[in-house]
Image (cartoon, grey):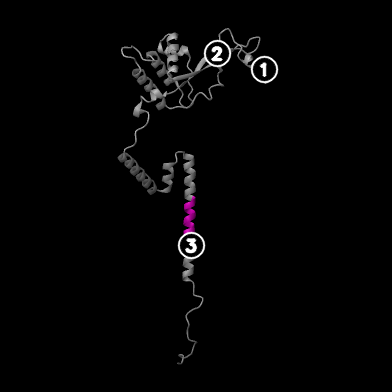
Amino acid sequence: MDIQIGAIITRVMTRRTHAPIRRNSKPAGKCEAGFWRPTTRKTVNQIVLAAKRYEIARKAPGARNGPLGVVALEVLELLANKVDFPTGRLDPSIDYLKKMLRRSRDAIVRALAALRDHGFVDWLRRFETAESAGDRGPQVKQTSNAYRLSLPAAARALLGRYYSPSPMPDDRAQEDATRAAEAKDALQSIPRDERIEATIEDPAIAGALTKLSRLIGKQRESAKQTESGSSYIIDKRTPLFGPLTRPCGGSEPRN
């Protein structure tokens, strides 16, 4: 029964308009959560560089192009410039790629296929609800793919030292450690209020901590003065038992 209900819902959600919907298309806005991943500019640049080296390394002698081709490299660079680093979102349309690269639709499609076959690009086909609902309920239409860039192992090996950062020289590490120690000593030498302002960027938090620091300082000074006054009274107090004196009019004790 559950299977039948699920099949009915699927048929309703994927009811088509006059435009065809590609096989295995997913609903836009609901399928990208596990597909897009946050990335960085460095990672994207590594993918583009690896693809260029891969194209050269795999090109047959005398051949004009390698396994990717010039258009594929152009498409990859454009995708690298369009990706949103914090979210990994990347969903330009084929028409956008055609317009920006001034290539035919067939050339763009073949370039994307080459990038996918060699592991540099992957995508999800997507559909969305059409603006006008038909008599039989909501209708859907094809929308742009969701793309994701990746770095295949065969191309990663061509990056060499560029892929993994080289170890820091010993003298550079020692210099950084010395600078960090000097900076710490300099920070400790300045007054507490200035130290707070130098280390806390938020003015509101810095002001609150400065007031708290001054209050604590005043309490400590007050405690020191109280302790000093108490010791003075104790020192000047008359001893409980004064020095032994002879009774008035008495004589020296006899042996």
Question: Disc 1 marks which residue?
Answer: 4
Sequence-first disc among 3 and 1: 1
Q: Is residue 238 left or right of residue 163?
A: right
Image position, residue 56 (x, y; %): 34, 18
Question: Disc 3 marks which residue?
Answer: 227
Q: Is residue 251 above or below residue 200?
A: below
Q: Secondary structure at mark 3?
A: helix
- The answer to which of 221 and 88 lies nearer the viewer is 88
For label 1, the crowd category at 10 Å Cα-Cα, with few meaning under 14, some 14 to 19 and many 20 or more, is few
Image position, residue 42 (x, y; %): 40, 27
Image position, residue 192 (x, y; %): 42, 48
Question: Looking at the image, do the residues carrying marks 2 and 3 touch, with CB atoms under 8 Å apart?
Answer: no
Amino acid marked by disc 2? Arg
Sequence-first disc among 2 and 1: 1
Image position, residue 183 (x, y; %): 36, 44
Q: Quadrant of residue 58?
A: top left
Amino acid marked by disc 3? Glu
Q: CA distance from mark 3 to mark 1?
A: 86 Å
* Residue depth check, mark 2 versus mark 3: number of the one nearer the observer: 2
Look at the image and give the residue range highlighted in magenta. Answer: 215-227
Q: Which mark is residue 23?
A: 2
Residue 226 in magenta? yes
